[in-house]
Amino acid sequence: MAFGMFQRILIANRGEIALRIIRACRELGIESVAVFSEADRGAFYLTQADQAFCVGPAPSGESYLKIDRIVSAAEVGNVQAIHPGYGFLSENAHFAEICRECGIEFIGPPVDAMAKLGDKVAARQIAMDAKVPVVPGSEGLITSEEEAIRVAKEIGYPVLIKATAGGGGKGIRAAHNEMNLRTELKAAAAEAEKAFKNAGVYIEKFVQNPRHVEVQILADQHGNVVHLWERDCTMQRKHQKLIEESPAPNLPQSVREEICKAAARLIKTAGYYNAGTVEFLVDKDNHFYFIEVNARIQVEHPVTEQVTGIDLIKEQIRIAAGEKLTIKQRSIPCNGCSMEVRINAEDPDNNFRGTPGLIEKLRIPGGHGVRFDSHVHQGYRISPHYDSMIGKLIVHKPTREEAIACLKRCLREFELEGPGVKTTIPLIAKILEHSTFINGDGDTGFVERTF
């Protein structure tokens, strides 16, 4: 047995995160099994796995989201566990349940905790039970226009209408008055039904000009919970993150400690284990409010790895194998400053339209404290079928000022060329030069207002 109960793990994902997990498995002496769609056939990262199975055509609904095909590949590959990565089936409680019913461990939280936290109304209640502040709003799902109007009047406009099964910014609408509320309530429910097959929505007070701060946690199956400090994800557009960093700038130490303790308390109350992220809004007076739990590893996890020195993917595997956490809260550092920028194949000057295509030239920056997590290479064809992320550029320096300077230098070095391929690098470079970002004074609407 290579490690704990696992000799072989299947990765139910693709691209950058699949390669990240394959590498962690290799270092632990665990064999890895990859799955791929026809669009990803021949990708370099598949050659790094010990085995790879095709699970269908390019559309994710016919391949990466096909539970029966993923489980069949796991059974043929004779694996003991499945790592879902992020996106696709990573927060699908039904998938986790099927895996475990088939005798295959799901590298993630227990089904009950995932289901409850995946429903934002239920998650709000867990937060309240854990005495974690929540944004004022409806007690449950909104069942009529009249109820929505009553709640909005009680908490005051503007309000946010949010899908209970939401994610990725879908099913979220702002309303600034009663007429606006009636229109947006229908629009949010329709969008939620289309995206999640669940039209349920609830209402929250619209926190004006907030920051987005999230806390990384690890919890084992023996009741031990630790936090790995916070990340600031305020730089975003339409709820999609552009820049993440740790520690959060301009956050008072007392608030920092309290928000991290609150996250750990909520996770323990939920009966949750494995890795997860508890997300908060922080207002101008540094009051924080719980918004949701991401019951999976996140895109920005390298930021936490850099400041703590802890490999989160390996910890996920160890926890799933039933091991106790060996990390003690008092010994978890937060050294220096780490920042991550997401480089996407999108055109910022054309409403962020996706720009798939062949990468004919690629030069990746390097140097002390520089990390680039990606699966692409020269000759790689960016697919139009999936998320447009090319890779994640991560830097780690002793101070925030040095981290910003390093990122700016790296973006100048970065070269990626191909017919029709444009990236978000020019926009990121502009943000890094702006005094509001440099001073750590931004809010979640900063990018859209300014650029």
Image: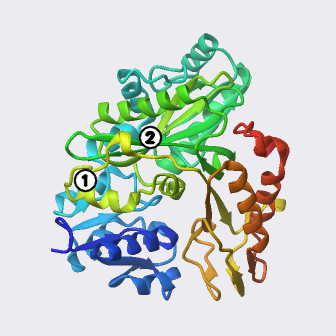
SS class, disc 2: strand
Establish if 331 lies above or below 20.
above
Seen at 79% across and 52% down, the residue is 431
Q: Alpha carbon of mark 2 to alpha carbon of mark 1: how far?
A: 19 Å
- Residue highlighted by disc 1: 97
Seen at 75% across and 78% down, the residue is 415
Residue in the foreground of this view, choosing between 94 and 412 = 412
Question: Image quadrant of residue 70?
Answer: bottom left
Tag shown at residue 443: none
Residue in the foreground of this view, choosing between 4 and 57 = 4
Seen at 58% across and 50% down, the residue is 336
Report whether residue 202 is seen.
no
Of the residues under marks 2 and 1, which one precedes in the sequence? 1
Establish if 115 lies above or below 88.
above
Q: Residues within 10 Å of mark 2 (few under 14, many from 20)?
A: many
Image side of residue 349 versus residue 392, left or right: right
Where residue 83 appears, x then y in whole percent? 34, 64
Q: Amino acid at mark 2?
A: Val
Where residue 368 appears, x then y in whole percent? 62, 69
Report whether residue 205 is seen.
yes
Q: Quadrant of the N terminus?
A: bottom left
Seen at 44% across and 40% down, the residue is 293
Number of numbered callouts drawn: 2
Where residue 374 appears, x then y in whole percent? 56, 72
Q: Amino acid at mark 1?
A: Glu
